[in-house]
Each structure stands twice: as C-alpha cells, then as structure tokens.
Image: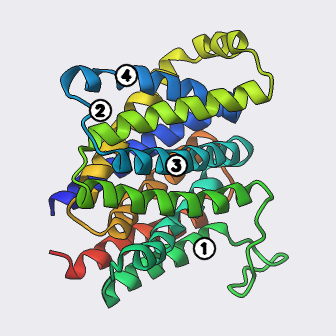
Amino acid sequence: MVWFILASCSALLSAAAAIIQKKVLLRAHALEFSFLVSLIIMVLSMYVPLTMDITAIPQSTLLIILGKSVLGGLAFLLVMMALERNQISSVLPLLGLTPAVTACVSFLATGEVLTGWEWIGIGLVVAGTYLLERRPAGNSFSFLSVPRLPTSHYYIIGALGLFAVSSVADKLLVTGYKTDPRVVLVYQHIVYCVIFGVLLRVRRIPARLVLQKGREHLPFLVAISALTIAYRFTQLEATKDAPVALVLAVKRTSILYASLLGGKLFSDDRLGVKVAGASLIVASGFVILRNVS
C-alpha cells in the first residue's frame, strides 16, 4: 500500500501545482512559462549530480530516458497551452483518461494485464471525465448529448497519448532497468529545458524578454518547480511497486482537488457538475484498490 500513499501525495502536489500554474498563465504565454519552470527545475535538480554519478548508466537506458523526456516535455507544453486558453475545471478532467490510455499502451508494450475490478475503476475515470466535459443539450440536461470540445482541448487529447507512452517508459526504467528515479528526473528536466529553449529560438522570442517576465512571477515559478519535482518523484517511486495505469489512476484524483479549489478561485462555470464528475474519478481509486494488495 506504500505505492498508494505515494501516488496520493503525487496527486495533492500535482493539484497544487496546477492551481498556481493557472494563476501564472493568466498573464504569461504557455511556451515562455514552460521554459521558465523547466529552467528553475533544472537548477534545483543539480544537487543530484553532486550526490551521485548520473553518468553510470548504460547507453540504452540513457536513450530511453532522453526519448521519453522529449515526449513528456511536449505533453507538458500541450497541457499548459490548453490551460492557458480554458478554465482549469474544464481542461484538467480530460487528463482523467490517461490511466485508461496508459493501460492499453502498457498491455501492448509490456503485457501488463489489469483485473476486472481494475478495469471497472478505470471505467469510472472515463465516466467521470464524460460528465465533467458534457454540455446541456439546449436548455435540458441530456445524458445522450455528446460533449463538444473546444479546439484547444485537442491539445489535451494529444498530450494523453504522449503521457501514456512516457509513463510506460518510466515503468520500464525504474523496474526493468532498475534506474534511480532521481537520475531519470535530472535528465528529464534537462531535456525539457532544451526543448522549450529551442522552441523559443524558433519563434524568435528573445531570452532577455522571457527572463524579465520570469522575475515578475519568480515566487510562483519557484513554488511550481518545487511542487513539480515532488509530484514527479513520488509518481516514479509509486510506479516501482504497482502497475503504471493504477498509479496514474490514483494520481489523477488531483483532478477533484484542482477542479474544486481552482474552480472556486477562478470562478469557473458548471462547477457543481464538474465536481460530481471528478468525484467519480476519485471513487475509481477505491474500486481499483479492491483487489490490489
């Protein structure tokens, strides 16, 4: 059950980070924000090379870390782009689909099979996500109505696939290759910073201007960075002892916390319905735990 505690801590930390992210993104662009957060995280992560040899890993392991970090970085940017353009209680719920997508990818990649109860739990995640995203048909509330997603929500859909592949790679690294999560994270943060820096260069956004904006939000950026390191580390640690889809299912309970508190802070609409849907996602964690020792 240690993995469940770690995954739950990751959920709380992730929710706190998401709320502060939304606050900063009200006045900052997603790409600039992603670069600044990645830069601070990279700096904070530099204690790892001082305490252990991060180069003492096989080349094949390093290539997996770099590849999965590219996918994770792009997924993070897509989520920030969606969060910049939409209400927090509308964007985050779509991430509730991550465990189901990851379970499918994990099965295809590693043969990791979930039980019937675990699939029921993931089904609740999907149902909760549907309830969070659906809209009333006209003036009536029809359960047959199909949610119509804003264009920017497709950023989240793209992120789902990238997160799923990246998460399965995390599982392979920390269990199959026995890689220390701290080593994975320090390389990951370096890759993130490089990716976002290159994209800023491509868009011809001056680094001086980005850093100037960063000073305006520095306390929030530092808080987000510390929370991000913490929730990524606890997620990796939890992945050591449980199927990756189950860890993500529990972690995604962050949707409830962020939707409720963030929705109130930013005056989101339909907050009651969204919280009801998010509650289904939280309930899924208890169903998943029914047959997990």
Mark 2 and mark 4 lie on one chain; the one further toward the N terminus is: 4
Q: Is residue 127 above or below residue 174?
A: below
**Rendered position, 147 above or below 166:** below
- For disc 4, the marked residue is 44
Going from N to C along the chain, the mark reached first, 2 or 1, is 2
Work out whether residue 20 can be spotted.
no
Query: Mark 1 or mark 4: which comes first in sequence?
Result: 4
Dot 1 and dot 4 residues touching (CB under 8 Å): no
Could you tell me the amino acid type at mark 2? Thr
Along the line of sight, the residue nearer the viewer: 283 or 99? 99
**SS assignment at label 1:** helix
3D distance between C-alphas at marks 1 and 4: 39 Å
Disc 2 designates what residue? Answer: 55
Under tag 4, what secondary structure? helix
At numbered mark 2, what does the secondary structure look like: helix, strand or loop? loop
- Residue at mark 3: 72
In which quadrant of the rendered view does residue 146 lie?
bottom right
In the rendered image, residue 147, in percent from the top left (x then y), is placed at 73, 73
- Residue 118, percent from left and from top: 33, 81
Whole-angstrom CA distance, mark 2 to mark 1, is 47 Å
Depth check, mark 1 against mark 4: the one in front is 4
Q: Nearer the viewer, mark 2 or mark 4?
A: 2
